[in-house]
Amino acid sequence: MTLISELTILQPADKEEVDLPRTSADEPAIGKKRLYIESYGCQMNFADSEIVASVMRNAGFATTSSAEDADLIFLNTCAIRDNAEQKVRNRLKHLTGLKRQKPELLVGMLGCMAERLKTKLLEEEKVVDLVAGPDAYRDIPKLVEEAESGQKAVNVFLSREETYADIAPIRLNSNGVTAFVSIMRGCDNMCSFCVVPFTRGRERSRDPHSIVRECQDLLDQGYREVTLLGQNVDSYKWAESSSLPDGEGTGVGSTAPVTFANLLELVALIHPDLRVRFSTSHPKDITDDVLHIMARYDNICNYIHLPAQSGNSRVLKLMNRTYDRPWYEQKIHSIRRILGEDCGISTDMISGFCTETEEEHQDSLSLMDFVQYDYAYMFAYSERPGTLAAKKYADDIPEDVKKRRLNEIIAKQLAHSAARNQRHIGQVQRVLIEGPSKRSDAELCGRNDQNKMVVFPRGDWQKGQYVNVLVTECTSATLRGEVV
Ligand code: SAM
Ligand code: SF4
């Protein structure tokens, strides 16, 4: 085994850029109108754009990767922080120029920002022709027709039932190996800082049959990894009205509701070569049942995204997260007890929430020391109109203080990521190949169980294959090694 002292720690250069929008890819378009979709924000939005592409294909549109070539442009937007909305507003300025050159071009706003601002968007942004919220995507062809006839079109109705269960998503810009599968929509949690319950409506779970069918179809098409998506996957619940085939110990086939642990098992049972990931777990709802199912199946990845948001119990209470620090620490103990030290754990952290003191900020840092997260998404608090926090608490931490605290959180995380990645040095990791590495065609990359990107020389390997890689180097973002 290689000694750690002999190994290089590379510089953190190829940290993934999670903030970049995703764009649609080119489909054959003979006789069809062209649709360009740009998706911002979370994985859920990327998955939603694939549903929109499917709806639009049936309405005679083919996707394109070029905004300049499109007859119709959709921005699938995010409203989670003010800067997410500003990014979209800037993009609209560019599209205004494009529309001047091509007056018949239609521009539609979809997603959370569309839902939050509703008709106000049409008043404020003249370039926008149609607005559709996250539950109105079936209605988009009709809205496009209205817009084509010169009227502005809006549907921001939020549903209690819509899960788009019967719509087969069209994979956009896919690597052909990994795919997102929505298992639920909306959120009932009302964290005080968060706009999601207002933009995505009430929580509802999708029929497990349709989820398993979609995952099976993906496997049949050559995909080898699915990520099950929901704002709080642990509150997934499907109550059967009709009877289902017996699913040996999975809960399906009985009258008991299908829980997330049951669903995870159903998907894991599809095929041992189909890897299963999921996001997001909620500390208040994650159960030992889920952890035991993860331990039982090798193809369920050993990685949990368990956002803490803060390490201080008073702040967590103000955030309405409904757990406190000891509860969160207990959950970490359970993960370590059932899944071991190597299970990857990541978090979301917010700096400078209303009234957060320096000591309370230190508690966030000390929680990070306690958990030793593999990865974190870190944000400065951004007040969102209409949320409980905006109504009840003053956004009283100055921006420079929020930023300084955020930088401290980021610095700590970089150190922890590097240390956690170093643990893998000298280990052999099972990697699912996703394609060429970003830097060079002579290298391939893929993720290990813990969701870490692993880069290695190409050899004769192909994407979609599993390989065992001996890890020899790491940065805080990437592992490097050789196939053994
Ligand atoms: N449902 C997930 C959960 O509860 O962990 C998270 C969903 S949210 C789209 C992603 C992350 O954005 C949150 O975990 C939180 O850290 C961050 N976030 C949400 N609202 C925010 C705000 N107003 N300011 C800063 N960050 C925010
Ligand atoms: Fe927002 Fe909280 Fe729901 Fe996550 S659980 S989407 S942070 S309200």
Image (cartoon, rainbow, N blue to C red):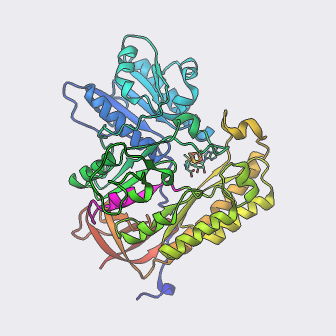
Q: Position of residue 18 (x, y in %)?
A: 49, 51
Image position of 194 with respect to 456: above or below: above
Where is residue 263, by image quadrant?
A: bottom left
The mark total stands at 0
* Residue 372 seen in the figure: no
> At x 21% / y 69%, what residue is drawn?
460
Does residue 475 appear left or right of residue 178 in this picture?
A: right
Does residue 292 appear left or right of residue 379 in this picture?
A: left
Where is residue 434, by image quadrant?
A: bottom left
275 drawn magenta: yes
Residue range (magenta):
263-281
> At x 47% / y 81%, what residue is drawn?
7
Q: Position of residue 393 (x, y in %)?
A: 77, 41
Residue occupying the far front of the picture: 255
Viewer-nearest residue: 279 or 109 = 279
Image position of 166 with respect to 33: above or below: below
Where is residue 414, by image quadrant?
A: bottom right
81 drawn magenta: no
> At x 58% / y 58%, what residue is drawn?
283
